[in-house]
Image (spheres, rainbow, N blue to C red):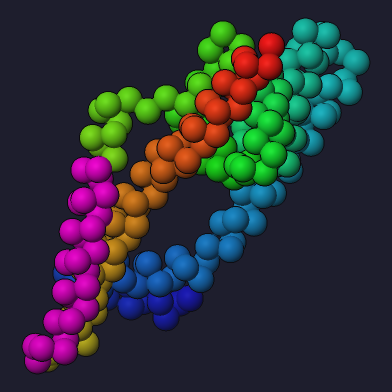
Amino acid sequence: METVLKYLINSLENGNILVAFAVISVASIFKAHALFDFLEKRKESKNKSIKEIISNEHISEDVKNLMQEKLNALSFETATGIYAENPLRGKIIEKYNESKGEMSLHQIKMAMPHIKHKNDEIKVEIGSWEKIEFYATNAGALLLMLFSLLLILVPATTKITSIAQFLSIYGLALIFFVVAGIMFKSSLPIIFAKKIKPIIESNEQAKKLTK
């Protein structure tokens, strides 16, 4: 780790920003597990604190009820990956069971930004502006991916005179690739919303016909 830090400092002092970015990116990949461990321990600590509040006899019933609901929401998130307040949790389970395997909890989780709880029902809504943003984001991501691939091919067609130059080219390619990945990821909620929307609407229509 000390060697990595020295190389990073030297790169920054010499003005090789892209090299520094490449070093940070590679180091982050190997240290990602440490971040996940930290977040998991933090969640466990939060659950423990809530349970302690609930069991404290000096805390009022109103606060205990609030903390119990919070604990229920966190437990639901642990089980499904979805953080939702009551009664939305019940509706999510209801729609999941009605789908009979056509949609998964993971798909519901990914589509949550477009799931609205109105009049005691779940609706999947995708606005016109969101659709425009979806196509624009994916088009931009594809362009960045193309630029990234072109940069990767540069060393094969151009004479590279130093390691710093080589790393700078690949560092820029990495930046384009990471940004494109982030842009693609930002469009996932709409992709999953489009997938589960007809399933939920079809099941809802079937329920109305059977009444």
Q: Where 149 falls versus 68 (above or below)?
A: below
Q: Can the viewer see residue 137 in this picture?
A: yes
- Splitting the image into 4 quarters, where does residue 53 fall? top right
In the image, is residue 152 part of the stretch drawn in magenta? Answer: yes
Residue 132 placement (x, y as % from top left): 23, 35
Say which residue appears at 56% left-offset and 56% top-offset: 35
Q: Locate residue 106 relative to residue 115 in the image: left or right.
A: right
Over which residues does the magenta segment extend? Answer: 135-159
Task: Check the image and name the residue furthest to the left.
Answer: 158
- Residue depicted at x 66% and y 23%: 91
Is 138 within the magenta? Answer: yes
Residue at position x 29%, y 64% from top?
A: 177
Determine the main secondary structure of the stretch shown in magenta: helix
Quadrant in which residue 25 is drawn: bottom left
Question: Residue farthest to the front?
Answer: 209
Can residue 84 be seen here? The reply is no
Quadrant location, the C terminus: top right
Q: Position of residue 124 (x, y in %)?
A: 47, 26
> In this rendering, would 20 be left or right of 165?
right
Residue drawn at (10%, 88%), measured in percent from left and top?
157
